[in-house]
Image (cartoon, rainbow, N blue to C red):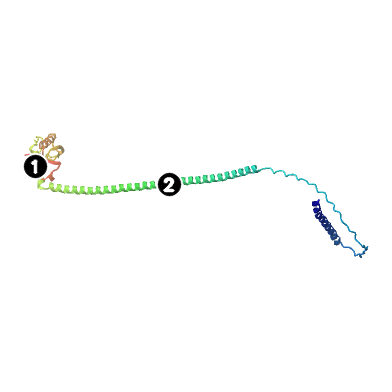
Amino acid sequence: MARDARNLIPISMAVLLHAVLLTSMFVAFDMARPVPFTPLVIQATLVSEIPEFTPSVVAPEPEPVVEEPEPEPEPDNSEELRRQAEEEKRIQDAFIEKERLEKIRQREAADRIRKEREEIQRKKDAEERREREREAAERKRQEDIQRQRDENERLRKELEAEQRFQEIEDEERRLAANNSPAMAAYQFAIAQRIRKNWAVPASAKPDTLCVVSVRQLAGGEIIGVNIVSCNGDEAVKRSVEAAIRKASPLPEPSDPDLFRPLLELTLRPEQKN
């Protein structure tokens, strides 16, 4: 009961406050409207004594306690969220991995293309280098060939010049020897040797003339006899050849430069003693 008495005062104050507020609102609404002026008539009754009034306090009945229903527990979707998060992470990781692999593939493809180009360029450079080396070797070979040809031509010309010079010297010496007393003595000795061995046939005439080519070795050995021309008959020709072969070996010259491997002799029958 004591607690109900303590609650009564605040409740009464609250009711009174609400009544005042409602009254103020009505008054304010009425004052807002224009009201014609009316004289105020006051009627009062004189009261000599105010009886004592003690309000009886009636305790309000306690309000029934309404138990609020417990809120239904929210469904536990943490596992679904976790699965969604894991799926999103898996998709994101897969996308990142795909991008990483794509970058690796592109890098490897670029490296492969670069290496292929480098290999192609290396082979091209090597082929060009080999081609330059072949060309250089071919030029050198041609230059060597030309140089050798020039050298051979020079040597040939020098040899020909030496040979011509030697031939000229030999010819001059031979001419000089042919016209020398030593050559005359050498030829006379050969003619004498042949004439001693020539049995002139009866058919030979005083104007018979035979030109004979005689080939001899060093030392005078005769290895060949050829009748170049002869106006005698066959008996004369055979007698001339037989006389020359019997004269082998021919006399040697006093000067070796006078030796001739090929002699051309002229024989006449009247010269035979």
Secondary structure category for the residue under label 2:
helix
Residue plotted at (34% across, 47% down): 137
Circle 1 — which element? helix
User: Residue drawn at (31%, 47%), measured in percent from left and top?
Assistant: 144
Q: Quadrant of residue 75?
A: top right
- In the image, which disc is placed on residue 146? none
Please, which residue is most extreme toward the front here? 2
The foreground one among 268 and 43 is 43
Front residue of 143/243: it is: 143
Residue 122: give its label: 2
Q: Is residue 109 left or right of residue 190?
A: right
- Which percent across, then down, holds residue 68? 76, 45
The percent coordinates of residue 34 (x first, y second) are: 87, 63
Kind of residue at badge 1: Ala
The spot of residue 50 in percent (x, y) is 90, 60
Q: Which label's residue is closer to the chain start, 2 or 1? A: 2
- Mark 1 is surrounded, within 10 Å at the Cα level, by few (under 14), some (14 to 19) or many (20 or more) other residues, namely some
> Which residue matches tag 1?
189
Q: How many discs mark residues in the rendered view?
A: 2
Q: Looking at the image, which is closer to me, 149 or 184?
A: 149
* Residue type highlighted by circle 2: Arg
Question: Left or right of 214: which side holds 78?
Answer: right
Of circles 2 and 1, the one toward us is 2
Q: Is residue 273 left or right of residue 48?
A: left
Within 10 Å of disc 2 (Cα), the crowding (few <14, some 14-19, many 20+) is: few
Q: Residue at x 8, y 42 (%)?
A: 189
What is the C-alpha distance between the residues marked 2 and 1? Answer: 89 Å
Quick one: which residue is furthest to the left in this view?
273
Q: Quadrant of residue 76?
A: top right
